[in-house]
Amino acid sequence: MDLSHLRGKYTTKGLDIKDLNANTVIQFETWFNDALDEKLTEPNAFCLATVGVDMMPSVRTVLLKTFNETGFVFFTNYKSKKAKQIEENPKAAALFTWLELERQIKVEGEIEKISTSDSLKYFLSRPKGSQIGAWVSHQSEVISSRSLLEQKFDEIKRKFLKGEVPFPSFWGGYTIKPIRIEFWQGGQDRLHDRFLYERQDDNTWTISRLAP
């Protein structure tokens, strides 16, 4: 199928360095709030790319649950494929794509587990169904059918019907500690505006304009 005729137009006024906050977290928060105001679907969804020892990249969509000066936090099964790759190579890239705003944000950095107490705090805030789901799914493993998955869900649901769902030791959060963050704004005639924040040794950030 030839897709060469698909050609969108970018109509924003562009982005200049004077429009950016020197603090990359504040700049991210500003753009994230714009995505919220636009009522985009799952604005906290991002593509997470990891690479294990086999050097084969893997990418999937996960949900951002918190961000601050330390990094960007998401949660997963610690026995999943992504977790195994992170253990083998603790570096990752993340991409937030907000096409309605003609914007992208790319994050590259080191990745590590958050504390058990912080993972527990978030787990307790989840709906009970999601808590049960964490116990049921052996993430990334081959299963014979969906009915088997649903059967396991019903078993766990009955088991914890009258009590709290215990915190699974194999589940928790990771934080991506950024080294580089790029803010991309679509521009006319493919002259997009790209600004790269790079962390320095003293934890300050430099900002550079990149060619589109």
Image (cartoon, grey):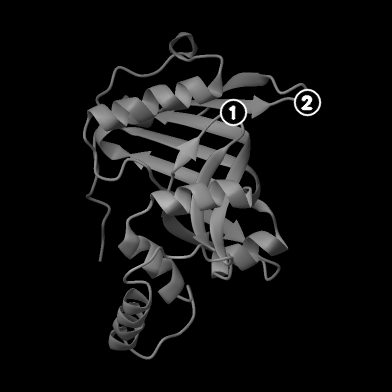
Above/below status of 50 relative to 84: above
In the image, 60: left or right of 54?
left
In the image, 156: left or right of 202?
left
Above/below status of 38 relative to 72: above
The image quadrant that residue 99 belongs to is top left
Q: Which element is circle 1 on? A: loop
Q: Nearer the viewer, residue 206 or 5?
A: 206
Q: Which mark is residue 69?
A: 1
Tell me how far mark 2 sits from mark 1, CA to CA: 15 Å
Residue pointed to by mark 2: 201
Can residue 77 be spotted in the picture?
Answer: yes
Report x, y in % for residue 103: 36, 32
In the image, 3: left or right of 92?
left
Report x, y in % for residue 118: 56, 46
Residue under the image location 70 percent in, 58 percent down: 89
> Contact, CB < 8 Å: mark 2 with mark 1?
no
**Mark before the other along the chain sequence, 2 or 1:** 1
Residue under the image location 56 percent in, 18 percent down: 23
Residue under the image location 59 percent in, 44 percent down: 176
Determine crowd level at label 2: few under 14, some 14-19, many 20+ residues with C-alpha closer than 10 A: few
In the image, 198: left or right of 201?
left
Q: Which element is circle 2 on? A: loop
Q: Quadrant of the N terminus?
A: bottom left
Amino acid at circle 1: Glu
Residue under the image location 37 percent in, 53 percent down: 126
The image quadrant that residue 205 belongs to is top right
